[in-house]
Image: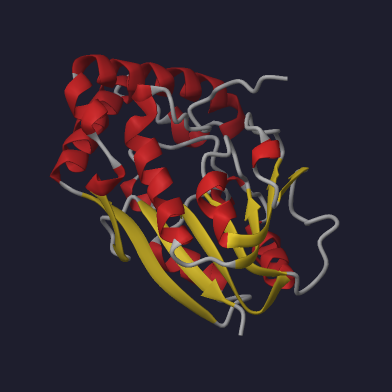
């Protein structure tokens, strides 16, 4: 069954998603310089990161609630499991060298259990690599997200289970910031009609479909008005560096001692 392409499932082929896709794929390129051994990916989405990380693994297990549209026969060391989580059904303790989970934790109602389960299935010395949006750089409320995190909130959560956390983040150059500010202005033109601030008062489930429709329309409009800018963005326009308040996403590495 084909999955509805919402703005939460970023496309590698839809040019209007390019701004988000390039920063998302950068996380996989960075992870590919770190990971090895037995790897678990939680929330593989469209599956565009699998071809980057699977060659680094002795075995690669990816989990998502939807089947990605890729041919697993070309990836002999990859196993796909379709399920919702947490908990991680069928995974024993101390199994994986690395757990990778990108743009997922903000969707998990019980984020504490999510982190505890990752800690459980990691081997001693294993590492969790997680990305998630920086709450302070979000332009508006995303009702698909249960929550977003500040630089300290995510660290505090991870340290409830893990012994050490390396804090990094994804930042953008002048081209990226130009798009960000155009996007911000465009979103503000839409939300100016929300005079009662309903986006923060209504239950998030009621806002998900309207948000998704408007978000998709906004990305298409930005592409139409700024085709050159959007099309020219590449992963090289983003960098992963020490975490600061201007990062778009957090890129944290937590280690199980």
Q: Quadrant of residue 205?
A: top right
Image x and y of residue 117, in percent? 72, 65
Q: In the displayed structure, would residue 245 be above or below residue 166?
A: above
Q: In the displayed structure, would residue 239 be above or below residue 8?
A: below
Left or right of 86, for residue 213:
left
Task: Name the quarter where the C terminus is drawn.
Answer: bottom right
Total marks shown come to 0
Residue under the image location 74 percent in, 50 percent down: 85
Q: Nearer the viewer, residue 13 or 153?
A: 13
Q: Is residue 136 visible?
A: yes
Left or right of 227, for residue 190:
right
Residue under the image location 45 percent in, 65 percent down: 252
Image x and y of residue 63, in percent? 70, 47
Image x and y of residue 254, in percent? 53, 72
Task: Name the quarter where the N terminus is drawn.
Answer: top right
Q: Nearer the viewer, residue 190 or 83?
A: 83
Residue under the image location 37 percent in, 66 percent down: 168
Left or right of 2, for residue 21:
left
Q: Outermost residue toward the bottom?
A: 257
């Amino acid at each position: 069954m084909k999955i509805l392409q919402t703005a939460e499932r970023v496309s590698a082929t839809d040019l209007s998603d390019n701004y988000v896709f390039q920063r998302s794929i950068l996380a996989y390129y960075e992870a590919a310089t770190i990971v090895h051994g037995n790897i678990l990916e939680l929330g593989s989405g469209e599956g565009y990161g699998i071809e980057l990380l699977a060659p680094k693994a002795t075995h690669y297990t990816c989990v998502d609630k939807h089947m990605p549209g890729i041919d697993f026969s070309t990836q002999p060391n990859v196993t796909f499991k379709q399920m919702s989580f947490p908990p991680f059904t069928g995974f024993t303790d101390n199994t994986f060298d690395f757990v990778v989970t990108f743009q997922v934790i903000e969707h998990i109602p019980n984020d504490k259990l999510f982190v505890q389960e990752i800690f459980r299935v990691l081997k001693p010395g294993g590492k969790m690599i997680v990305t998630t949006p920086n709450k302070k750089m979000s332009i508006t409320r995303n009702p698909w997200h249960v929550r977003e995190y500040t630089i300290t909130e995510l660290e505090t959560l991870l340290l409830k289970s893990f012994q050490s956390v390396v804090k990094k983040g994804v930042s953008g150059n002048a081209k990226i910031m130009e798009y960000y500010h155009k996007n911000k202005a465009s979103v503000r033109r839409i939300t100016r009609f929300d005079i009662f601030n309903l986006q923060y008062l209504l239950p998030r489930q009621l806002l998900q479909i309207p948000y998704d429709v408007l978000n998709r329309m906004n990305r298409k409009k930005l592409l139409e008005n700024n085709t050159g800018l959007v099309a020219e963005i590449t992963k090289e326009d983003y960098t992963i560096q020490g975490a600061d308040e201007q990062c778009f996403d957090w890129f944290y590495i937590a280690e199980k001692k």
